[in-house]
Image: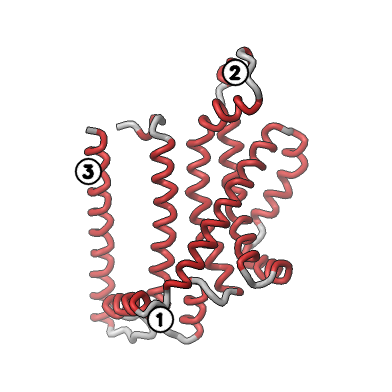
């Protein structure tokens, strides 16, 4: 019964999602037709769809799509692991929290687009500089989620593990990580969106391949149709990676109250 309920909810969500997109496209077409907007200002939906089909059919977009997806996944995974480790250390070692938290906040508030030229100088224009930028955008939200999750662990649960003679590893794996998962997955969802933004920004500034490069090329040549098509592909990548995190959350947090019907 639960699987049928989940399937029905998914289908309803997909239907509502498609309906909202269809309404948006309808208003888009009506506006273009009524205003006689030139194609270089706002192309018609049909022209954008034709451009999308051409990009995929001719194989133009595939290498760029693979490059961006690879950067997002690698950068997100590294940033998530580093954020979890850093968050754990900040909770367990008060000295580190007092010493480094101001610098971490300062680094997070720094405009990332301004750091891209520095990363290019330090790490070159290849994959490394882009991954470093993505990691810098992912690590802080995941770290914050880890800190929030561990600090929310009930004291009684920790005391029980200690009374039973449990090790720090058992405390982490049996108590702290399970209690931290809801906060962590919330931070993962923020982090994966940040990862997509970071990849596009890095490619926009210094890339020779990737969806950001397509957007740069289309913008520099005033090809608005290609620009909008590239933006749509980027949105799809963001939605796809976000949904991957969401599916993983559903599998690992099936026991959580928020997942029960």
Query: Residue 255: x, y in percent?
Result: 40, 29
Q: Which residue has dot 2 on it?
A: 161
Q: Residue at x 39, y 77 (%)?
A: 59
Q: Which residue has dot 3 on it?
A: 8
Query: Residue 182: x, y in percent?
Result: 48, 36
Disc 3 to disc 2, C-alpha distance: 41 Å
- State which tag comes first along the sequence, 3 or 1: 3
Q: How is the image coloured?
A: secondary structure
- State which tag comes first along the sequence, 3 or 2: 3
Q: Which residue has dot 1 on it?
A: 224
Disc 3 to disc 1, C-alpha distance: 38 Å
Q: Secondary structure at mark 3?
A: helix
Choose top left, top right, bottom left or bottom right for residue 114: bottom right
Q: Residue at x 28, y 56 (%)?
A: 17
- State which tag comes first along the sequence, 2 or 1: 2
Q: Residue at x 71, y 44 (%)?
A: 101
Disc 2 to disc 1, C-alpha distance: 60 Å
């Amino acid at each position: 019964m639960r699987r049928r309920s989940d399937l029905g909810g998914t289908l309803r969500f997909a239907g509502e999602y498609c309906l909202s997109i269809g309404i948006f496209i309808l208003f888009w077409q009506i506006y273009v037709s009524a205003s006689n907007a030139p194609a270089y200002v706002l192309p018609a939906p049909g022209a954008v769809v034709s451009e999308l089909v051409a990009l995929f059919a001719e194989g133009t977009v595939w290498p760029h799509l693979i490059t961006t997806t690879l950067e997002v996944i690698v950068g997100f995974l590294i940033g998530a692991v580093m954020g979890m480790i850093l968050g754990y250390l900040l909770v367990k070692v008060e000295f580190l929290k007092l010493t480094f938290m101001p610098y971490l906040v300062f680094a997070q508030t720094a405009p990332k687009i301004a750091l891209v030229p520095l990363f290019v100088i330090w790490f070159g224009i290849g994959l490394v500089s882009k991954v470093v930028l993505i990691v810098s955008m992912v690590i802080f939200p995941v770290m914050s989620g880890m800190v929030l999750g561990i600090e929310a662990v009930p004291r009684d649960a920790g005391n029980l593990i200690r009374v039973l003679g449990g090790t720090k590893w058992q405390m982490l794996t049996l108590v702290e990580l399970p209690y931290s998962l809801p906060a962590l997955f919330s931070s993962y969802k923020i982090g994966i969106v940040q990862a997509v933004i970071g990849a596009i920004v890095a490619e926009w500034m210094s890339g020779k391949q990737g969806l950001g490069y397509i957007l740069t090329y289309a913008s520099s040549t005033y090809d608005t149709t290609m620009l909008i098509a590239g933006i749509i592909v980027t949105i799809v990548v963001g939605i796809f990676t976000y949904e991957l995190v969401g599916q993983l959350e559903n599998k690992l947090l099936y026991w959580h109250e928020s997942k029960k019907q």
